[in-house]
Amino acid sequence: MIISLIVAMDENRGIGKNNRIPWHLNSDLKHFKVITMGHHLIMGRKTYESIGKPLPGRQIIILTRNLSYSVGNCLVVHSVDEALAVARSGGESEVFICGGSTIFTKFLAFADQIYLTVVHTKTQADTFFPIYNPEEWLESEVTHYEAGEKDQYPFTFKRLIRRVGARPLDKSWITRYKPTQ
C-alpha cells in the first residue's frame, strides 16, 4: 500500500488558520477530489470537524486520542498503526494522509509520496506542515497555475516521490499489525 500525504501550504509552510484553510483555490480542491476519489483518507479530528461531513466517494478514517469519539459513516482509530491497518484491511492500494499538522508529522516518516500544492503567498497561518528534507524527495510532476476568478492566488502542484534509500524508518511492521475488532 502506498502512503501519500496530500497538502496545500503557503510559502512559509502554513496550512491553516483557526482550523480553516486560509485561501480559496477551486482548481486545487478539484485536483484533491480527483486524486483521492475512491480511496481511504486519514485525518485528525480537528481536520474532520473543519470539513464537517464525510467526503463522498471516500472512506474517512479519523485519528484521535479521544477514545469515546464517534462519527457516523467514518472509521475512528487511535494510532498510526491502527489507521494504516484499517486502510490495508479495506483493500486500499494508496491511502491519503490529509492533515492536520500533528497527523502529517506522525505519518511523514512512513510516506512514499507527497502531493504538494505550494500556494504562492504568505498567510497568517497558525498551523504548519512539518519540515522535511527535500533531498529525500524527487519531483515527479510540477504544474503551475495562475490566480484567476476561482483561484485566489497562483500556486504550484508538485508530486514528490521518496528517493530510494531515503526512508528513515522500516515499514515492515505495518504488514504484521492486525487491527483490533
Image (tube, rainbow, N blue to C red):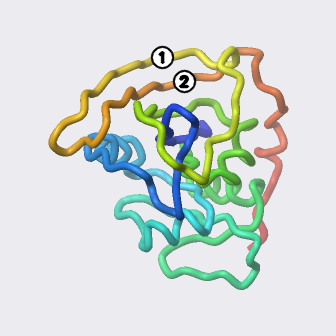
Residue type, mark 1 in image: Ser
Q: Residue at x 53, y 64 (%)?
A: 18
Q: Residue, x 32% and y 43% (percent of image)? A: 34
Q: Which residue is denoted by mark 1 in the rendering?
A: 140
Quadrant in which residue 144 is drawn: top left
* Residue located 69% across and 18% down the image: 136
Lateral position of residue 54 relative to residue 152, left or right: right
Q: Earlier in the sequence, mark 2 or mark 1?
A: 1
- Residue under the image location 50 percent in, 39 percent down: 9
Q: Is residue 55 left or right of residue 109?
A: left
Label 1: few (<14), some or many (≥20) within 10 Å? few
- The kind of secondary structure element at disc 1 is strand
The answer to whether 81 appears left or right of 2 in the picture is right
Query: Residue under circle 2?
Result: 160
Q: Amino acid at mark 2?
A: Leu
Labels in figure, total: 2
Q: Is residue 170 above or below residue 137?
A: below
Alpha carbon distance from label 2 to label 1: 6 Å
Give above or below for 63 relative to 148: below
Location of residue 176 in the rendering, given as x and y in whole percent from the top left corner: 82, 48
Foreground pick, 23 / 102: 23
Report x, y in % for residue 20: 47, 60
Q: Point out residue 156 in the picture as x, y percentages from the top left corner.
A: 38, 26
Disc 2 to disc 1: CB gap under 8 Å: yes
- In the rendered image, the quadrant that contains the N terminus is top right
Q: Secondary structure at mark 2?
A: strand
48 is higher (above) or lower (below) than 105? below
Figure check: 138 above or below 180? above
Which of these two is toward me, 150 or 114? 150
Indicate the quadrant containing the C terminus: top left, top right, bottom left or bottom right. Answer: bottom right
Q: Which mark is residue 52?
A: none
